[in-house]
Image (cartoon, helix red, strand yellow):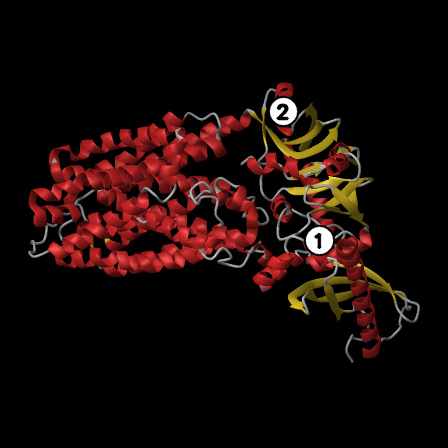
Amino acid sequence: MQQAGVNKIGAGQLFLTLFVGRVVFLLSMNTVLVGGESLQELIPSCLASYLLQFLLFLPLWLLHRRRPDQNLLQAAKSLLGRFGFLFLPLYALYFLFFAAYLLSLLQLFMANIMEPHASLPLIAIVTALSASYAAWKGIETIGRTGAIVSVFAACSLAAIFFFLSLKINPLNFVPFFEDGGKQAASGILLLLARSDGLTAIAFLGAQTRGRLGLGFVIWNTVSYAVIAGLLAVMTGAMGAYLGDQLFPFYAAASFAEMGAVQGMDAVLIGIWIFCMLVKLSTDLYLLRLCVESAAPRAGKWSVLVGAVLTAGLSLAICSMRDLQKLFYGSSLFLPFTLVCAAGVPLLLLICDLVRRGKAEKKGGKGKAKKAAALLLSMLLVFSASGCREQIRLNRRLLIEGIGIDLQDETFLLTVQTTKITEGETREVSVYTAEGPSILEALGSLTQQTGQDPLYSHALVVVFGRSCADAGISGMLDFFVRNAETRPNAQIMMAEGDASEVLTAKREEKTVSAKVLGEILETQNMNGNIARITLTDFVNHFGNDGACPYLPVVRPADEGVEAAGTALLDQQGRILAVLDEKATRGALYLLGGFDRGLETVSLPDGSQLTAELHDLKTDITALVRDGTPAFSISIRCAADIGALDGGVGTRYGESAYAVMEQTLAEEIKKETQTALDLCLGEYGADIFLLGRRLHQANPKEWQKYAEQWPQTVSQAVISVQTKVEIARVGQEDTPAIE
């Protein structure tokens, strides 16, 4: 029987495989795992852990240089004789625990995100046995597979990084180390506890061709850069919303969209499954090496036993909260990792007095075919899950719009579904349901249709005025808790009943939720409505004194139209509704539109209509004489659309300067109106001024945090506006002489 120890892989294959392992850690990261701590605080933790990795790697590397042809257990046996076998159960348990921990996370994801009624035992057994295939074939099969999977993983993560970076809002970041660095320190311990890659190197270094030290430097640097970079864009794009998500990276992937790309969550699931299988294969192979060091003939069969034990332990973790706390925290794996990754190598290094000859190099044929076979088996598993998903979708009611009204403590739901028919015609169906809660109302909808609702296609959520009168905050729990809800779903409030908006007609046809979202997005781009997503809406609750807001809509001849902006308190109750002019002023501060029309009267009595674009708003926060102060600078370009001065009227530089000044004054007036209403009259900080002060001066912010609505109404705010005319149309006199 061929022994595992004779297989050889290149250093590149080894570290690409280990990169896949760190990708799995990132994808699997959840709020339970990090103890509910801020993901942002893990960013500096990555830097500290990155540097500490080199310290932990040092004794391992020095030992490898002295004994390049021995893995850790072989070195222990050589140096300590029979006592070297004492380390065998330690490492066997270590690899088994890690494999079970990762497999349990996959099960939790499947049960909470993909399919609540999924058979966890079946998932555990199928996944573990699939991973055992590569562990049975050997390290070269794993290495080749890991190298291939790492390429797809890297491309997918790069795409997610790119799409999320387009959605970064600097106000989603808070100052680091506000708790004295406790969360960051906890994050360091967490990252070190998950550093099983070091132990893998200790076992696989002897089977690796190439420069192990250089490979480690590149792997450690790149993998931590990827983790820190993705954590940064996740936080910047979604902020505190991620703290409510069981699997934040999945939520971030759902949020990563642009144009036709409607979220990267499907890609993430595929990459996760492939990476998980590679990581589990590696852990099972390392467990095999432990067994082979004591009983060479039992090595391969130990893979199957290890797969069964992994599946069983992972099921126990999923079903027992005490085990979850033990495995998902750092108390179990941190001492394990420190001892296995650094402690034992350091001990053996000290005891190293003799050298052994190099192990016989043995090549193998057909390894590429084996790697291809493993990839094929993975693909079959993934395809099977995809087929199951398709079947599942056929039994689901695909929801694109939800309207919620409240009457006598009963929720009245209007649900809009869309089916694509031949010729890509959209057929809209509307259902109504009611119940004492949103979930129970949707349950009655299931009884009506015979299909379970699927919310992953929900583009629009409309709250009726009755909900805003009662308080929307408590109604958000369903949407935030339900993993199927897309974080970029558009949230709005109906001027009257939400049902009227979801059943609005255009050309005698019900306006689909998709078209409704497109209409509102266009109005937002034109500066008529303050569009907001579920993520941003949730982040406004409890965010440094911020007040949430919602666009208000109403039925119209062309479907729906903007009806202002609703200001809400922290319970989601309505404070006031801004009209169109005040909404425009608010959008100047929020930076919330791409192009908008502004009509002003010039000093000579003529009317000017200009299209504004390239809006840039800068807000600087400071404390002046014990009072918060904010300096606001608004700049934009303008294209002259209409000017009633008469055909053939010629304008010079001075005339255009007057137009610019008039437009700037009008923008300042509208902005000041929005500030006076939102801050002065209602103390509603929808502009996140509190967050800006928090970022600029954390110590001063603590003085005002509890009384911010009262404080912000007394804040000193100065507004400067500037408009530059960019285009004048086909006028024969240019803007600048």
Q: Quadrant of the N terminus?
A: top left
Q: Which mark is residue 709?
A: 1
Residue at 34% of width from left, 51% of height from top?
Answer: 192
Sequence-first tag of 1 and 2 = 2
Corner quadrant of residue 449: top right
Front-lying residue, 671 or 384 = 671
**Whether residue 652 can be seen here:** no
* Residue type marked 1: Pro
Give the x, y percent position of residue 153. 40, 48
Residue at 47% of width from left, 52% of height from top?
Answer: 231
**Whether residue 612 can be seen here:** yes
Q: Is residue 141 above or below residue 719?
A: above
- Disc 2 marks which residue? 440
* Residue type marked 2: Glu
Residue at 22% of width from left, 42% of height from top?
Answer: 91
Front-lying residue, 435 or 17 = 435
Give the x, y percent position of residue 86. 14, 41
Crowding near the residue tagged with mark 1, few <14, some 14–19, many ≥20 C-alpha atoms within 10 Å: many
Q: Quadrant of the C terminus?
A: bottom right
> Callout 2: helix, strand or loop?
helix
- Judge from the rendering whether residue 330 lies leftward or rightward of residue 722; answer left or right: left
Give the x, y percent position of residue 443. 61, 23
Give the x, y percent position of residue 345. 19, 52
Q: How many marks?
A: 2
Corner quadrant of residue 475: top right
Crowding near the residue tagged with mark 2, few <14, some 14–19, many ≥20 C-alpha atoms within 10 Å: some
Q: Is residue 641 above or below residue 533?
A: below
